[in-house]
Image: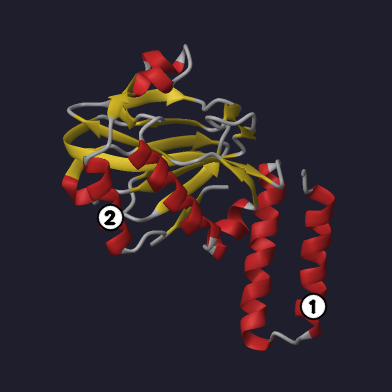
Amino acid sequence: MMLTLPDVLTPDQLARCREALAGAAWVEGRTTAGHVASTAKRNLQVSQDDETGQRLAAFLLDVLGSDPRFIGAALPLKVLPPRFNRYEGGGDYDNHIDNAIFSIPGTPHRVRSDLSATLFLSDPADYDGGELVVQDTYGTHTVKLPAGHMVLYPGHSLHRVTPVTRGTRLASFFWIQSLVRDDSQRSLLHELDQAIQELAGDDAAHRSVVRLTGVYHNLLRQWADT
């Protein structure tokens, strides 16, 4: 399942993020990639030791934790603290698949990357190139979203970022371990949840809404991996 969440950040929140990132400590992105991916990666990332990046990551986790669209789509069990990258001057990231497991810095905890997320922080008009290109079983998808919008896609997908030939592309990226590991099951639950919400908007007390809600939770109970 690939899903776009519009307006995850407000204009004021976006402005705060951009202002903070302007003063952050940036390092070569290849230093945080695996052995194979490091040869394909040409960008900058905020150092994981940088306090500004850590504060922004905590802020984004708070925002996501209160967004019912994100909760309903991802069914998050664990979320790796968001990271931040910058592409400019022809920087790109060739085809790769993300690591299956990520360690949370400073903790003994690990996150399985069931879902990958990119939150766009730059307006598309401010840069050329920089499209996120994702290949999955349904074909190839090209993503370049307005600032503040976010895309979720399966962590096992082959994907790349095309060269940025003008301007600067800022984004936050992170991974989610879902309560439901299987992407097809998670997609079915999301569709069922959306249908229930539409029906509930017409008549929340209708017996079909109650029955379908029970089906949703019984499926979640059966498929959840905690």
Residue 103 vs residue 216: left or right? left
Q: Residue furthest left?
A: 166
Residue 46 vs residue 74: left or right? left
Location of residue 19 in the rendering, given as x and y in whole percent from the top left corner: 23, 49
State how far apart marks 1 and 2 are (Cα). 42 Å
Location of residue 164 in the rendering, given as x and y in whole percent from the top left corner: 22, 33
Residue where numbered disc 2 is placed: 16
Image quadrant assignment for residue 71: bottom right
Q: Secondary structure at mark 2?
A: helix
- Circles 1 and 2, Cβ within 8 Å, touching? The answer is no
| Rendered position, 7 above or below 21 | below
Q: Is residue 122 visible?
A: no
Image quadrant assignment for residue 170: top left
Location of residue 73 in the rendering, given as x and y in whole percent from the top left corner: 59, 56
Choose between 20 and 15: the one closer to the eye: 20
Residue 210 numbered tag: 1
Residue that appears at 56% across and 32% down: 104
Q: Is residue 225 visible?
A: yes
Residue that appears at 40% across and 30% down: 49
Q: Earlier in the sequence, mark 1 or mark 2?
A: 2
Mark 2 nearby-residue class (10 Å; few <14, some 14–19, many ≥20):
few
Choose between 123 and 105: the one closer to the eye: 105
Q: Amino acid at mark 2?
A: Arg
| Rendered position, 191 above or below 48 | below
Q: Amino acid at mark 1?
A: Val
Residue that appears at 18% across and 50% down: 125
Choose between 50 and 12: the one closer to the eye: 50
| Rendered position, 4 above or below 167 | below
Which colour scheme appears in the figure? Answer: secondary structure
Q: Secondary structure at mark 1?
A: helix
Residue that appears at 61% across and 27% down: 101
